[in-house]
Image (cartoon, helix red, strand yellow):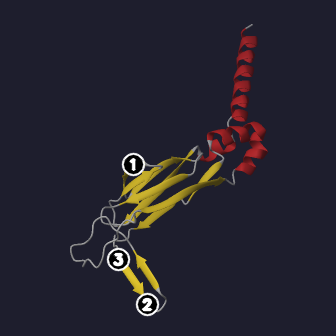
């Protein structure tokens, strides 16, 4: 009687392990549903925003969900903002998933985002000094105006735009 109960327990446990293996996708097992992305800037100490939410200051390593693309904005007072997009693309592990996980594993990884990888994996922002200026190229009949909200006290005012009525 005890042998029958032990065998039933082994069969139930084996069945549960097999089902768990089939339900979990290969990509979920190999690299998970999130990915570390490194962010740096020159100079350091810039604020980092992901999809509009503050994440910290550079240098920084963030854990981002593979399921979505992300907009990264890096800001430092006195410098032009830096913006880039981290995009998702299908991971090479999808082929292993198709072979070993079947359609169920593929569906699980597509739903939880493990099917994707994020690129670039590293962001290095070269922060540019905020400088607004005007340039006139007489030979090419060209006027370039760059506007700033905080002019330098060293600048000389040469004109002012007026609103048309």
52, above or below 16, in the image = below
For the residues bearing labels 1 and 2, Cβ distance under 8 angstroms: no
User: Taking 50 as reference, is 104 left or right?
Assistant: right
Tell me which label, 1 or 2, sits earlier in the chain.
1
Between label 1 and label 2, give the one nearer the viewer.
2
Q: Earlier in the sequence, mark 3 or mark 1?
A: 1
Q: What quarter of the picture does the C terminus occupy?
A: bottom left
Q: CA distance from mark 3 to mark 1?
A: 30 Å
| Relative vertical location of residue 8 with respect to residue 109 in this rendering, above or below | above
Q: Residue 54, which numbered label?
A: 1
Which element is circle 1 on? strand
Percent of width and height locating residue 56: 37, 51
Residue 165 numbered tag: none
In this picture, is 139 found above or below 26? Answer: below
The alpha-carbon separation of the residues under discs 1 and 2 comes to 44 Å
At horizontal 65% and vertical 54% (from top left) the residue drawn is 89
Q: Which residue is mark 3?
A: 133
Label 2: how many Cα within 10 Å (few below 14, some 14–19, many 20+): few
Q: Residue at x 47, y 87 (%)?
A: 141
- Which tag is nearer the camera, tag 2 or tag 3? 2
Residue 163 in the figure: left or right of residue 68: left
**Residue holding disc 2:** 138
Depth check: give the residue in front, 126 or 23. 126
Q: Earlier in the sequence, mark 2 or mark 3?
A: 3
Give the image location of residue 111, x and y in percent. 66, 39
How much space separates mark 2 and mark 3, taking CA atoms? 16 Å
Task: Indicate which label's residue lies in the foreground, 3 or 1.
Answer: 3
Residue 144 horizontal/vertical position (percent)? 42, 78
């Amino acid at each position: 009687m005890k042998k029958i109960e032990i065998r039933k327990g082994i069969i139930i446990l084996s069945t549960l392990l097999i089902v768990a293996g089939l339900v979990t996708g290969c990509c979920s097992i190999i690299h998970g549903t999130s990915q570390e992305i490194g962010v740096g800037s020159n100079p350091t100490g810039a604020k980092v925003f992901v999809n509009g939410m503050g994440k910290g200051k550079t240098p920084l390593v963030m854990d981002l969900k593979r399921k979505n693309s992300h907009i990264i904005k890096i800001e430092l007072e006195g410098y032009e903002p830096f913006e880039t997009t981290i995009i998702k693309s299908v991971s090479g592990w999808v082929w292993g998933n198709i072979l070993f996980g079947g359609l169920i594993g593929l569906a699980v990884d597509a739903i939880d985002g493990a099917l994707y990888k994020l690129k670039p994996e590293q962001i290095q922002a070269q922060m540019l000094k905020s400088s607004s200026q005007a340039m006139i190229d007489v030979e090419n009949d060209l006027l370039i105006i760059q506007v700033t909200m905080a002019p330098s006290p060293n600048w000389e005012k040469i004109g002012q735009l007026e609103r048309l009525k």
